[in-house]
Image: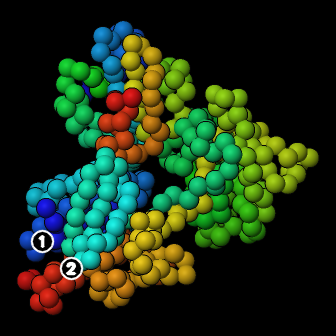
């Protein structure tokens, strides 16, 4: 999966031509580990239509602070460089699917 | 298509029930809104035989892989409603799909208890959190509060104290109900300040993030307590929302009443894991898995009219 950082966030997310689903996570966060396989499946299902990436909040504080992420897992959906939907906490794949449809 | 069995809940109880159902060749479906169940919040599991130390999330992943290897289908969605039509149960899920089954195993666990106060939902993820191990990093040198008096609440407060500038531990009673060793550590920790016999009435913020809490009594001359974060650790409540219109009997605390074979008072409905009252307050991964196995075994006998399971 695409690894997002403070450095590449602008190019990969804000200037992306297609919508982007961003998974804010950290290695010590148990529920985050459960989110990853779900959004990986979504990445395959929406291949070419939606970009899916993950951002380690510990290594990339700038983006995390900018978007006010204070709890993980948080999954944010960006369209045209703007946040359009957000889900905090571990949810079902169905819920993440709804974010993309929003 | 009518399934022989639908298991609701994808934690250790539900996953083990599926494993056994697969081995008994019971055509079934596993529906769970939260893969792995409550154990994914466990940073360290040291009492599940075969693993000296494993994270709850890793253990959950292993169980899920094993279940899938046995060929079971897992639907990662929520069940919204269940209706009983003679001997068939009809389930409606979040994505408006309908599933039918001859038997059900409820392995719905417990849900995190919320305070249900103004501001709690609004500031979720913007200062309000239910997982100190996940989110402590966002509160380095900040002021936070933990609500609760249990082991989970006190260990969360201590975990936060390692990073935060100050941690208020707010409990509605006195003394704390955590184990004495945790109480002692909290009392000795210079960053932890315990506020007894007090409730949080409201979470206040600046629309971006949490800024303070409104208490139900004055503390140090003020009803408002300035904090950057609020961690809620007030336990769980049994996930029995779905059984309410199935006339399944609950115990005094709201857990599903089960017989020694994990059956309930309603024929065809079984329960296992944290939602069932099989072991009283003793709710462990090992009890959940064994209850799941037992429930699947009982389902087999129920479907076969009392015939014993193959081993």
**Mark 2 and mark 1 in contact (Cβ < 8 Å)?**
yes
Relative depth, front residue between B254 and A14: B254
Q: Quadrant of residue B163?
A: top right
Query: Which residue is at the front of the view, B128 or B261?
Result: B261
> Where's the N terminus of chain B, which quadrant?
bottom left
Decide which of A52, B150 is in the foreground and name it: A52
Q: Is residue B61 above or below residue B260?
A: above
Quadrant assignment for the C terminus of chain B: bottom left
* Residue drawn at (24%, 72%) of the image: B88
- Give the x, y percent position of residue A76: 42, 29
Residue at position x 70%, y 54% from top? B169
| Secondary element at tag 2 | helix
Circle number at residue B299: 2
Furthest residue to the front?
B86
Provide the residue designation for mark 1.
B26
Q: Is residue B290 left or right of residue B142?
A: left
């Amino acid at each position: 999966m695409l690894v997002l950082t403070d450095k590449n966030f602008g190019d990969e997310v804000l200037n992306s031509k297609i919508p982007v689903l961003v998974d804010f996570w950290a290695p010590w966060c148990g529920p985050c580990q459960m989110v990853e396989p779900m959004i990986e499946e979504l990445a395959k299902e929406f291949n070419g239509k939606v970009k899916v990436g993950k951002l380690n909040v510990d290594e990339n504080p700038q983006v995390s602070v900018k978007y006010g992420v204070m709890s993980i897992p948080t999954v944010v959906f960006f369209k045209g460089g703007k946040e359009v939907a957000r889900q905090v906490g571990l949810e079902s794949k169905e819920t993440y699917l709804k974010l993309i449809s929003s | 298509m009518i399934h022989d069995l639908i298991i609701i809940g994808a934690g250790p109880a539900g996953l083990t029930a599926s494993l056994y159902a697969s081995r008994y060749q019971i055509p079934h479906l596993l529906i769970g809104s939260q893969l792995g169940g409550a154990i994914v919040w466990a940073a360290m599991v040291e009492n599940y035989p075969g693993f000296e130390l494993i994270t709850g999330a890793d253990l959950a992943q292993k169980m899920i892989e094993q279940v899938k290897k046995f060929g079971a289908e897992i639907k990662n969605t929520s069940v919204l409603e269940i209706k009983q039509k003679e001997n068939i149960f009809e389930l409606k899920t979040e994505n408006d799909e309908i599933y039918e089954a001859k038997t059900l195993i409820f392995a719905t666990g417990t849900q995190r208890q919320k305070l249900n106060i103004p501001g709690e939902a609004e500031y979720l993820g913007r200062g309000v959190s239910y997982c100190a191990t996940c989110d402590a990093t966002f509160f380095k040198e900040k002021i936070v509060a933990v609500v609760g008096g249990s082991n989970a609440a006190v260990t969360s407060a201590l975990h936060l104290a390692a990073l935060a500038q100050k941690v208020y531990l707010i409990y509605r009673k006195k003394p704390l109900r955590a184990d004495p060793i945790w109480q002692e550590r909290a009392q000795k920790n210079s960053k932890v300040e315990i506020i007894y016999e007090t409730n949080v009435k409201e979470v206040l913020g600046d629309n971006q993030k949490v800024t303070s809490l409104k208490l139900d009594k004055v503390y140090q001359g003020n009803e408002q307590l300035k904090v950057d974060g609020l961690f809620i650790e007030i336990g769980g409540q049994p996930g029995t929302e779905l059984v309410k219109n199935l006339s399944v009997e609950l115990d005094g605390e709201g857990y599903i009443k089960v017989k020694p074979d994990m059956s309930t008072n309603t024929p065809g409905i079984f329960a296992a894991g944290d939602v069932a009252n099989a072991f009283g307050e003793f709710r462990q991964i090992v009890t959940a898995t064994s209850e799941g196995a037992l429930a699947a075994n009982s389902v087999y006998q129920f479907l076969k009219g009392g015939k014993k399971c193959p081993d």
